[in-house]
Image (cartoon, helix red, strand yellow):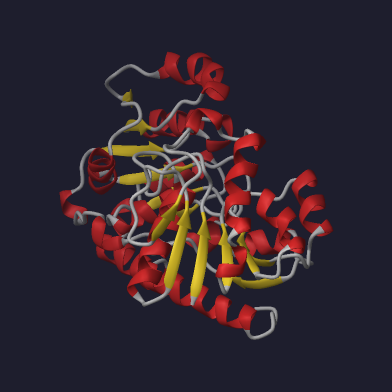
């Protein structure tokens, strides 16, 4: 197939640091090329890919995320070439869906974000303009009337992640991600203190969440039992995940998919999480970690991490969230769409 892979323009593919969507685009693009598909990646000019690269902007621009002026330029470059492809697979946001009624090439749109009242109205007004792919059954259930072509979980390349046996884990808990109130870092600190455990936190602090970090999180960081190590390199991230006793995910909102959970499990580290959004689909309770209702449950689960086998965590990710499985899932979506667009 001739496939246009439309990434967001803000962060290069693959990303150097934060960028969950960009990792998914990278994994899928490279895997499709390996399987013999002709793929053109629309992304920032500093992206690295074995596909053809088409870039409007020479380099990534994370400081301009959400500026529609740049998004529309980027998406329109893909739309100008739409007739060259069998289909367009969009990961970029809303603009491509708005363009979809005006092109003849089918548009497959992966829903990477949550449904809010505004986004739900947007998608419902264009429910048949694209072929939608949900990233979890939870997400799909939030707006079931769209023209869905399937549900495909986000993948990771497990082979790139180190593995550490349960007996060789370190003496700390880990919380990782973008620092915002809905990620629950304040709860992770509370839980670690209550459990008498050491906690390491890592991740980006964006300007919009600077006040939360400075007023709520930073005063609780003591550099010993509660540590913040900043936004770390990929190799440092691998080490932090692999050597943690457990990964805490006290999410405070119904996230449609949490890539960090499968990253933790890939290294053999059990996940302890609240049952918000897709969490019950991602974590196998009692097998790869624990899904708990509240902070008290999280404290209790920490005392039980010895029940979780590290190899079982990794095997679970290989079986359910591999790049190969996701690629096959999308190939089925593409075939379904090109055969007439039956719902999947």
Q: From the viewer's perspective, is residue 107 above or below residue 71?
A: below
- Dividing the picture into quadrants, the one containing residue 44 is top left
Query: Where residue 19 appears, x then y in whole percent?
Result: 44, 43
User: Is there any visible trace of residue 108 in the rendered image?
Assistant: yes
Q: From the viewer's perspective, is residue 344 above or below residue 65?
A: below
Between 157 and 213, the residue placed more toward the observer is: 157
Between 303 and 168, the residue placed more toward the observer is: 168
Q: From the viewer's perspective, is residue 49 above or below residue 3?
A: above
Q: In the orientation shown, which residue stands out farthest toward the bottom?
A: 339
Quadrant where the image shows the C terminus: bottom right
Query: Where residue 332 appears, x then y in whole percent?
Result: 53, 80
Query: Where residue 69 appears, x then y in whole percent?
Result: 65, 35
Is residue 293 left or right of 159 when viewed as pictured? right
Q: From the viewer's perspective, is residue 258 above or below residue 33?
A: above
Is residue 50 left or right of 37 when viewed as pictured? left
Between 140 and 12, the residue placed more toward the observer is: 12
User: Is there any visible trace of residue 284 in the rendered image?
Assistant: no
Is residue 5 left or right of 93 when viewed as pictured? left
Task: Report the residue at 36% width, 32% height from top.
Answer: 202
Query: Where residue 38 appears, x then y in whole percent?
Result: 43, 71
Task: Report the residue at 57% width, 48% height from top.
Answer: 293
Task: Report the residue at 32% width, 61% height from top.
Answer: 50
């Amino acid at each position: 197939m001739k496939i246009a892979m439309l990434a967001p323009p803000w962060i290069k593919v693959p990303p150097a640091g934060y960028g969950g969507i960009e990792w998914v685009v990278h994994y899928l693009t490279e895997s499709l090329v390996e399987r013999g598909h002709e793929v053109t990646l629309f992304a920032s000019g500093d992206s690295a890919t074995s596909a053809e690269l088409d870039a409007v902007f020479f380099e990534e621009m994370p400081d301009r995320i959400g500026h529609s002026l740049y998004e529309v330029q980027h998406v329109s470059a893909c739309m100008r070439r739409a007739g060259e492809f069998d289909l367009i697979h969009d990961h970029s946001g809303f603009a491509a869906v708005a363009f979809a009624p005006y092109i003849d090439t089918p548009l497959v749109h992966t829903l990477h974000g949550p449904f809010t009242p505004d986004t739900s109205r947007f998608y419902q007004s264009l429910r048949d303009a694209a072929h939608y792919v949900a990233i979890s059954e939870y997400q799909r259930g939030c707006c079931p009337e769209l023209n869905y072509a399937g549900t495909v979980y986000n993948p990771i390349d497990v082979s790139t992640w180190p593995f550490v046996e349960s007996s060789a884990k370190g003496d700390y808990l880990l919380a990782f991600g973008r620092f915002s109130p809905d990620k629950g870092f304040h709860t992770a600190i509370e839980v670690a203190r209550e459990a008498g455990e050491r906690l390491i936190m890592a991740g980006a602090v964006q300007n919009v969440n600077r006040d939360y970090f400075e007023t709520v999180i930073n005063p609780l960081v003591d550099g010993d039992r509660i540590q913040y190590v900043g936004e770390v390199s990929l190799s440092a991230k691998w080490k932090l995940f692999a050597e943690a006793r457990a990964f805490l995910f006290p999410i405070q909102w119904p996230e449609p998919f949490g890539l960090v959970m499968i990253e933790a499990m890939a290294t053999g580290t059990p996940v302890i999480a609240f049952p918000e959004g897709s969490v019950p689909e991602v974590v196998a309770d009692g097998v790869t970690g624990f899904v708990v209702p509240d902070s008290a449950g999280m404290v209790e689960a920490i005392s039980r991490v010895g029940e979780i086998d590290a190899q079982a965590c990794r095997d679970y990710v290989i079986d359910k969230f591999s790049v190969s499985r996701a690629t096959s899932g999308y190939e089925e979506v593409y075939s379904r769409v090109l055969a007439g667009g039956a719902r999947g």
